[in-house]
Amino acid sequence: MKYTLLILAFFTSIFCVNAQSRYTVDGNSRQVSAHRYNPRHAIEHRHHNGVQEGYRGFVDVNFFAGNDGVFTEFNVVGGGFSTTHGYQFNPNVFLGGGMKFQYHSFDNFDNTYSMPFYADFMVNMTDSKISPFFDLKLGYSFTEIEGVYLSPSFGIRFGLADNLAINTSIGYSLQGYSYEESFLHYYYNEKASIHNLNLSVGIEF
């Protein structure tokens, strides 16, 4: 009798455990995993190769062609690089700052360079491995070309791994500057703006 009761208790416990691992939806019994739900694993899966929250850095190279604001034709070409660092507040919104070095080759003036320091605001349109984004940089250059810097752009982010991606973008940039003019032996400064079409490619980490 004692052994019979032990056997009945054993099979009863097995039945209870199996019953707890099933639930009913619309009259149908379904099996659920016995593993405990881990929200951290769910978040990591959802953001796999997507934008990760926290620190975010960029290094980009860019090429541009445009107009110097004095003559009507396209007479400025050049290229450079930039580095940006900041914080990703959620899968969509980034805020940071950085520096950009640009070499300008003019048809009508001496070649020169600019180095704007800027604040950067970026919005990723989707939370996925491949995502379009909008980027806006606003700052000021204190070098040979001195003036306000503004650059909106649109691009695509290609996630390669967690915290690693390649970005490509196309956009517009405005770089303010001043130049010296003369009239009847009088010299004065005129203000103008360089208007460029930009192509950029870079790495995100």
Image (cartoon, helix red, strand yellow):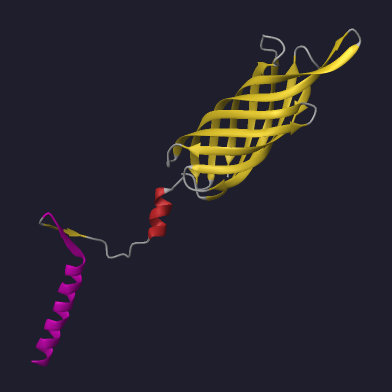
Query: Horizontal and vertical percent for residue 107?
Result: 75, 12
Query: Horizontal and vertical percent for residue 118?
Result: 66, 37
Total label count?
0
Question: Where does the N terminus fall, quadrant-wise?
Answer: bottom left
- The boundaries of the magenta stretch are 1-26
The structure residue drawn at horizontal position 43% and vertical position 48%, both measured from the top left corner, is 47
Query: Horizontal and vertical percent for residue 164?
Result: 54, 44
Q: Nearer the viewer, residue 100 or 166?
A: 100
Which quadrant would residue 14 be assigned to in this image?
Answer: bottom left
The structure residue drawn at horizontal position 67% and vertical position 9%, both measured from the top left corner, is 72
Q: Is residue 27 above or below residue 57?
A: below
Q: Main secondary structure of the magenta part?
A: helix
Q: Is residue 78 above or below residue 96?
A: above
- Asked if residue 41 lies in the magenta stretch, the reply is no
Q: Residue furthest left?
A: 1
- Asked if residue 2 lies in the magenta stretch, the reply is yes
Question: Where does the C terminus fall, quadrant-wise?
Answer: top right
Q: Is residue 37 above or below residue 56?
A: below
Q: Nearer the viewer, residue 198 or 137?
A: 137
Q: Residue furthest top?
A: 184
Q: Is residue 201 above or below residue 165?
A: above
Q: Residue furthest right?
A: 185
Query: Horizontal and vertical percent for residue 48?
Result: 44, 47
Left or right? Give the position of 60 relative to 110.
left
